[in-house]
Amino acid sequence: MFSTAVIHKFDTDQKAVAFTFDDGPHPVYTPQILDIFREAGAAAKATFFMVGSQIEQYPELARTVHGEGHEIGNHTYTHPYLSKLSAEEFAEEVIRTERLIQETIGVKPLTFRPPYFDYNEQAAEWISSRGYITAGAVNGEAMDWEQPGVAHIVEKTREKLSPGSVLLFHDGFGDRSQTVEAVRTLVTELAAEGYRLVTVSDLVRMSSSVRGE
Ligand SMILES: [Zn+2]
């Protein structure tokens, strides 16, 4: 059974990890991430937690991401601090984005990530009851969104990574050139080590139980 937990790592014996990219689609950086995964081979997939307002601006990009076999998750419509919203406002953020994703790519999102991981129990229960898996990440210390340097992003991710891990990166809101370079390095290294690069929903299917917090 899946709980209301934010899941950072799925229990699986399989050598697989899920790269995730938040806050896009972005016209500069999302295509660069797509290139990296395309070059890694037909089986290499990622999950993009998209912001609804960004999808409205770049629907074609969202369709390209989906068309190349990647997963699109729900990351709200305006990227708010969810704990500051009423239950109704929170539901509106999620449902508006859910409908937008469905209209844009023809598929309803299965996975969710709260902006800033700012999330309370009531919100967690509601999102779980709606059928979503809420994705965390093991490599929060990499802090790619702060542009701490490519080496820092790579090292802090490698320190925490193991089979079943969800990895957090950003392709939207700001200069993500460090993230792109770090992801290029990590994808190359992990593929060489025999890791499969899969979506969050793939990890759900591979795991019998999950570890959250
Ligand atoms: Zn975000």
Image: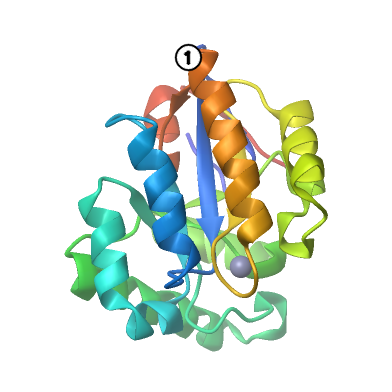
Quarter of image, ligand 1: bottom right
**Under 8 Å from ligand 1: the CB of mark 1?**
no
> Residue 191 at x, y = what percent?
49, 22
Residue at point 54% right, 80% down?
90
> Residue 68 at x, y = what percent?
25, 48
User: Viewer-proximal residue, 93 or 188?
Assistant: 188
Residue under circle 1?
Answer: 14
Inspect the image, locate mark 1, and give the three-letter code of the amino acid beneath it: Gln
Please indicate, yes or no, whether residue 132 appears anywhere in the rendered image.
no
Farthest residue to the left: give it. Answer: 106
Asked whether, in this view, residue 116 is left or right of residue 10, the answer is right
Placement of 181 over or under 73, stated as above or below: above
Secondary structure type for disc 1: loop
Please indicate, yes or no, whether residue 3 appears anywhere in the rendered image.
yes
Placement of 155 over or under 175, stated as above or below: above
Placement of 85 over or under 208, stated as above or below: below
Residue at point 20% right, 75% down?
103
Residue at point 47% right, 81% down?
77
User: Viewer-proximal residue, 204 or 146?
Assistant: 146
User: What is the quadrant of the C terminus in the image?
Assistant: top right
The image quadrant of residue 108 is bottom left
> Residue 195 at x, y = what percent?
50, 19
User: Viewer-proximal residue, 156 or 27?
Assistant: 27
